[in-house]
Image (tube, helix red, strand yellow):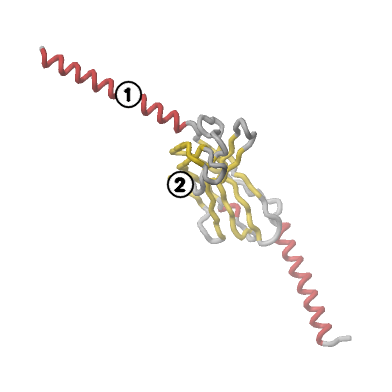
Amino acid sequence: MNTVLSRANSLFAFSLSVMAALTFGCFITTAFKERSVPVSIAVSRVVLKNVEDFTGPRERSDLGFVTFDITADLQSIFDWNVKQLFLYLSAEYSTKNNALNQVVLWDKIILRGDNPRLFLKDMKSKYFFFDDGNGLKGNRNVTLTLSWNVVPNAGILPLVTGLLQLITMVSCAADGGLIRQQQNHTKMNDARLKTKRTTHGEDKD
Protein backbone atom coordinates (compact mmCIF):
# COMPACT_ATOMS: atom_id res chain seq x y z
CA MET A 1 0.00 0.00 0.00
CA ASN A 2 2.78 2.48 0.89
CA THR A 3 4.51 2.33 -2.45
CA VAL A 4 6.45 5.21 -3.92
CA LEU A 5 3.72 5.81 -6.48
CA SER A 6 0.95 6.03 -3.89
CA ARG A 7 3.00 8.39 -1.71
CA ALA A 8 3.75 10.59 -4.73
CA ASN A 9 0.05 10.63 -5.56
CA SER A 10 -0.84 11.66 -2.00
CA LEU A 11 1.81 14.39 -2.02
CA PHE A 12 0.56 15.71 -5.36
CA ALA A 13 -3.05 15.77 -4.17
CA PHE A 14 -2.06 17.59 -0.97
CA SER A 15 -0.03 20.15 -2.97
CA LEU A 16 -3.02 20.81 -5.21
CA SER A 17 -5.24 21.31 -2.17
CA VAL A 18 -2.78 23.79 -0.66
CA MET A 19 -2.44 25.68 -3.93
CA ALA A 20 -6.22 25.82 -4.34
CA ALA A 21 -6.60 27.16 -0.80
CA LEU A 22 -3.92 29.81 -1.37
CA THR A 23 -5.49 30.82 -4.69
CA PHE A 24 -8.91 31.16 -3.09
CA GLY A 25 -7.39 33.16 -0.24
CA CYS A 26 -5.68 35.47 -2.73
CA PHE A 27 -9.00 36.00 -4.47
CA ILE A 28 -11.23 36.45 -1.42
CA THR A 29 -8.93 38.99 0.25
CA THR A 30 -9.26 41.34 -2.73
CA ALA A 31 -12.71 40.42 -4.07
CA PHE A 32 -14.52 43.32 -2.38
CA LYS A 33 -11.84 45.97 -2.76
CA GLU A 34 -12.86 49.26 -4.36
CA ARG A 35 -11.20 49.55 -7.78
CA SER A 36 -12.48 52.99 -8.81
CA VAL A 37 -10.34 56.12 -8.58
CA PRO A 38 -10.97 59.76 -9.60
CA VAL A 39 -10.17 60.56 -13.20
CA SER A 40 -9.84 63.94 -14.92
CA ILE A 41 -10.38 64.18 -18.67
CA ALA A 42 -10.01 67.40 -20.64
CA VAL A 43 -10.41 67.78 -24.39
CA SER A 44 -8.32 70.51 -25.97
CA ARG A 45 -9.16 70.05 -29.65
CA VAL A 46 -11.88 68.43 -31.72
CA VAL A 47 -11.93 68.17 -35.51
CA LEU A 48 -14.93 66.80 -37.39
CA LYS A 49 -14.95 65.74 -41.02
CA ASN A 50 -17.52 64.14 -43.27
CA VAL A 51 -15.67 61.51 -45.29
CA GLU A 52 -16.40 58.39 -47.25
CA ASP A 53 -16.46 55.31 -45.04
CA PHE A 54 -14.59 52.55 -46.85
CA THR A 55 -15.38 50.01 -44.11
CA GLY A 56 -19.13 50.13 -44.83
CA PRO A 57 -21.43 50.62 -47.77
CA ARG A 58 -19.26 53.47 -49.14
CA GLU A 59 -21.53 56.17 -47.74
CA ARG A 60 -20.26 59.41 -46.23
CA SER A 61 -19.98 59.39 -42.43
CA ASP A 62 -18.77 61.71 -39.70
CA LEU A 63 -15.18 61.17 -38.58
CA GLY A 64 -13.87 62.81 -35.42
CA PHE A 65 -10.31 63.53 -34.31
CA VAL A 66 -9.92 64.23 -30.60
CA THR A 67 -6.95 65.61 -28.66
CA PHE A 68 -7.30 65.05 -24.92
CA ASP A 69 -5.55 65.09 -21.51
CA ILE A 70 -5.93 62.40 -18.85
CA THR A 71 -4.91 62.64 -15.21
CA ALA A 72 -5.38 59.72 -12.82
CA ASP A 73 -3.56 57.97 -9.98
CA LEU A 74 -4.06 54.19 -10.26
CA GLN A 75 -1.60 53.27 -7.51
CA SER A 76 -4.31 52.20 -5.06
CA ILE A 77 -5.69 49.61 -7.50
CA PHE A 78 -2.55 47.49 -7.54
CA ASP A 79 -2.14 44.81 -4.87
CA TRP A 80 -0.83 41.26 -4.64
CA ASN A 81 -3.68 39.98 -6.81
CA VAL A 82 -3.41 42.46 -9.70
CA LYS A 83 -1.26 41.48 -12.66
CA GLN A 84 -2.06 44.36 -15.00
CA LEU A 85 -4.65 46.96 -15.98
CA PHE A 86 -6.16 47.34 -19.41
CA LEU A 87 -7.31 50.95 -19.81
CA TYR A 88 -9.50 52.27 -22.59
CA LEU A 89 -11.10 55.61 -23.36
CA SER A 90 -14.53 55.42 -24.94
CA ALA A 91 -16.96 57.98 -26.34
CA GLU A 92 -20.65 57.55 -25.61
CA TYR A 93 -23.40 59.47 -27.36
CA SER A 94 -26.89 59.08 -28.75
CA THR A 95 -28.22 59.79 -32.24
CA LYS A 96 -31.53 59.57 -34.02
CA ASN A 97 -30.68 56.08 -35.27
CA ASN A 98 -29.19 54.66 -32.06
CA ALA A 99 -30.05 55.35 -28.44
CA LEU A 100 -26.49 54.52 -27.38
CA ASN A 101 -23.27 54.59 -29.38
CA GLN A 102 -19.96 53.50 -27.85
CA VAL A 103 -16.65 53.96 -29.64
CA VAL A 104 -13.22 53.11 -28.20
CA LEU A 105 -10.77 55.91 -29.00
CA TRP A 106 -7.62 54.94 -27.08
CA ASP A 107 -6.24 52.16 -24.89
CA LYS A 108 -3.19 51.35 -22.79
CA ILE A 109 -1.85 48.42 -20.74
CA ILE A 110 -0.20 49.12 -17.38
CA LEU A 111 1.77 46.18 -16.01
CA ARG A 112 2.75 45.62 -12.40
CA GLY A 113 5.88 47.65 -11.84
CA ASP A 114 4.99 50.32 -14.41
CA ASN A 115 4.24 53.87 -13.36
CA PRO A 116 0.55 53.82 -12.36
CA ARG A 117 0.18 57.61 -12.34
CA LEU A 118 -1.19 59.04 -15.57
CA PHE A 119 -0.31 62.58 -16.61
CA LEU A 120 -1.01 62.41 -20.32
CA LYS A 121 -1.08 65.65 -22.29
CA ASP A 122 -2.17 66.30 -25.88
CA MET A 123 -2.93 62.66 -26.58
CA LYS A 124 -4.53 61.87 -29.93
CA SER A 125 -7.19 59.25 -30.50
CA LYS A 126 -5.59 55.90 -31.28
CA TYR A 127 -8.52 54.53 -33.26
CA PHE A 128 -10.88 56.12 -35.79
CA PHE A 129 -13.84 57.94 -34.26
CA PHE A 130 -16.32 56.95 -36.97
CA ASP A 131 -20.06 57.37 -36.68
CA ASP A 132 -22.31 55.11 -38.74
CA GLY A 133 -23.88 58.15 -40.35
CA ASN A 134 -23.94 61.86 -39.62
CA GLY A 135 -24.55 61.81 -35.89
CA LEU A 136 -21.41 63.57 -34.63
CA LYS A 137 -21.69 67.04 -36.13
CA GLY A 138 -23.75 69.26 -33.85
CA ASN A 139 -24.12 66.51 -31.24
CA ARG A 140 -24.04 68.02 -27.75
CA ASN A 141 -24.12 64.87 -25.61
CA VAL A 142 -20.80 63.15 -26.36
CA THR A 143 -19.22 61.89 -23.13
CA LEU A 144 -15.69 60.54 -22.75
CA THR A 145 -15.25 57.78 -20.16
CA LEU A 146 -12.05 56.13 -18.95
CA SER A 147 -12.59 52.51 -17.91
CA TRP A 148 -10.29 49.61 -17.12
CA ASN A 149 -10.26 45.85 -16.75
CA VAL A 150 -8.39 44.61 -13.69
CA VAL A 151 -6.47 41.47 -14.72
CA PRO A 152 -5.93 39.43 -11.52
CA ASN A 153 -3.70 36.52 -10.69
CA ALA A 154 -6.78 34.65 -9.50
CA GLY A 155 -10.46 35.49 -9.57
CA ILE A 156 -12.88 37.43 -11.73
CA LEU A 157 -12.05 40.08 -14.32
CA PRO A 158 -13.86 43.22 -13.10
CA LEU A 159 -14.72 46.12 -15.38
CA VAL A 160 -14.35 49.48 -13.60
CA THR A 161 -15.25 53.02 -14.64
CA GLY A 162 -13.38 56.02 -13.28
CA LEU A 163 -15.06 58.27 -10.71
CA LEU A 164 -15.58 62.04 -10.82
CA GLN A 165 -14.60 62.36 -14.43
CA LEU A 166 -14.25 66.07 -15.17
CA ILE A 167 -15.01 66.29 -18.87
CA THR A 168 -14.58 69.61 -20.64
CA MET A 169 -15.90 68.57 -24.02
CA VAL A 170 -18.94 68.95 -26.17
CA SER A 171 -18.55 67.39 -29.58
CA CYS A 172 -19.88 70.43 -31.40
CA ALA A 173 -17.56 72.72 -29.43
CA ALA A 174 -15.14 72.44 -32.33
CA ASP A 175 -17.76 73.81 -34.70
CA GLY A 176 -18.62 76.59 -32.28
CA GLY A 177 -14.94 77.39 -31.84
CA LEU A 178 -14.46 77.64 -35.59
CA ILE A 179 -17.50 79.89 -35.84
CA ARG A 180 -16.24 82.14 -33.06
CA GLN A 181 -12.80 82.30 -34.65
CA GLN A 182 -14.33 83.16 -38.00
CA GLN A 183 -16.44 85.87 -36.39
CA ASN A 184 -13.40 87.32 -34.63
CA HIS A 185 -11.45 87.17 -37.86
CA THR A 186 -14.26 89.01 -39.65
CA LYS A 187 -14.30 91.71 -36.97
CA MET A 188 -10.54 92.13 -37.32
CA ASN A 189 -10.91 92.51 -41.10
CA ASP A 190 -13.66 95.12 -40.58
CA ALA A 191 -11.42 97.01 -38.17
CA ARG A 192 -8.57 96.92 -40.69
CA LEU A 193 -10.87 98.20 -43.44
CA LYS A 194 -12.05 101.05 -41.20
CA THR A 195 -8.43 101.90 -40.38
CA LYS A 196 -7.52 101.95 -44.06
CA ARG A 197 -10.51 104.14 -44.90
CA THR A 198 -9.62 106.56 -42.11
CA THR A 199 -6.02 106.69 -43.30
CA HIS A 200 -7.07 107.33 -46.86
CA GLY A 201 -9.43 110.08 -45.66
CA GLU A 202 -6.60 111.77 -43.79
CA ASP A 203 -4.40 111.59 -46.87
CA LYS A 204 -7.06 113.25 -48.97
CA ASP A 205 -7.41 116.06 -46.43
Residue placed at 54% from the left, 31% from the top? 139
* Label 2 secondary element: strand
Q: CA distance from mark 2 to mark 1?
A: 32 Å
Observer-nearest of 154 and 87: 87
User: Which quadrant holds residue 201?
Assistant: top left
Task: Please state, as top left, top right, bottom left or bottom right, where the N terminus lies in the image.
Answer: bottom right
Q: Is residue 170 visible?
A: no
Quadrant, the C terminus: top left
Q: Are marks 2 and 1 in contact (CB under 8 Å)?
A: no
| Residue linked to disc 1 | 186
Between residue 55 and residue 106, name the one nearer to us.
55
**Residue 82: x, y in percent?**
63, 58
Question: Nearer the N terminus, badge 2 or badge 1?
Answer: 2
**Residue 65 spot, x, y in % from top left:** 47, 41
149 lies above or below 137: below
At a point 73% along the width and 66% down the height, the residue shown is 22
Residue 5: tell me if it is visible.
Answer: yes
Say which residue label 2 marks.
123
In the foreground, 150 or 66: 66
Tell me if 43 is positioned left or right of 86 in this view: left
User: What secondary structure is marked by label 1?
Assistant: helix
Question: In the image, what residue occupies the spot 63% across and 36% down?
Answer: 100
Label 1 CA crowd tier, 10 Å (few <14, some 14–19, many 20+) = few
Residue occupying image coordinates x 76% and y 66%: 20
